[in-house]
Amino acid sequence: MKKAKVLFICTGNSARSQMSEGLLRKMAGDITDVYSAGTKPSEKVNPFALKMLSDSGIDTSGHYTKSVTEFLDKEFDIIITVCDNARQNCPVFPGKAVKYHWNLEDPASVEGTEEEKLEVFRNTFADISKRVSELIDMIKNMPKKKEKSGEKDLGINL
């Protein structure tokens, strides 16, 4: 079986897309090649995102922020924007990737105590985990040949 190539795109590539990448890599095993990038990448991955990943047994040593420009010459099977800003500023990629949009709130934008911030990250991480699980089911049932490229807004279900 050919591995599905998946790219998660966010604005800063510091939280939502990083958590999505880590979760899909862990949960999907060897059925995907997964990447994440930002339209305006931050200087570093958010420490709360790294905590969510490491608390789930995900190795974070390879996680760093990347720009979408690093991937413009690569073809993907699935491209998922995880925020509205990334959706609006997503560049065109070669190939016939199916595009999805997950409108996730930015946990990094929440102000408050460390515990309040952790709670928001936990909720976002749980939401991403559910969506990733549904994505894996979809990938396992992908037809051999894509019918056509396009964008699908799957809302809360994916």
Image (tube, helix red, strand yellow):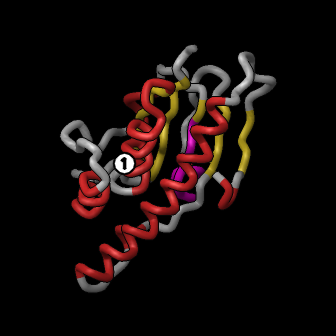
| Above/below status of 16 relative to 65 | below
Q: Is residue 22 left or right of residue 77?
A: left
Whether 23 is among the magenta residues is no
Most foreground residue, 109 or 62: 62
The answer to which image quadrant residue 34 occupies is top left
Which residue corresponds to the image point at 26% horizontal and 81% vertical from the top-left?
A: 115
Which residue corresponds to the image point at 59% horizontal and 22% vertical from the top-left?
A: 94
Q: Residue furthest bottom?
A: 112
Which residue corresponds to the image point at 56% horizontal and 43% vertical from the top-left?
A: 80
- On the image, the x and y values in percent for residue 53 come to 30, 52
Most foreground residue, 152 or 60: 60
What crowding class fits label 1: few (fewer than 14 Cα within 10 Å), some (14-19), or many (20 or more)?
many
Which residue corresponds to the image point at 42% horizontal and 55% vertical from the top-left?
A: 16
Query: SS class of the residue under badge 1?
Result: helix
Q: Which residue is mark 1?
A: 18
- On the image, the x and y values in percent for residue 105 come to 50, 67
Q: Is residue 154 left or right of residue 78?
A: right
Q: Residue furthest right?
A: 147
Q: Which residues are magenta?
A: 79-88
- On the image, the x and y values in percent for residue 29 come to 43, 30
- On the image, the x and y values in percent for residue 49 come to 30, 58
Q: Is residue 99 left or right of residue 65?
A: right
In the image, what residue type sits under mark 1?
A: Gln
| Above/below status of 99 relative to 110 | above
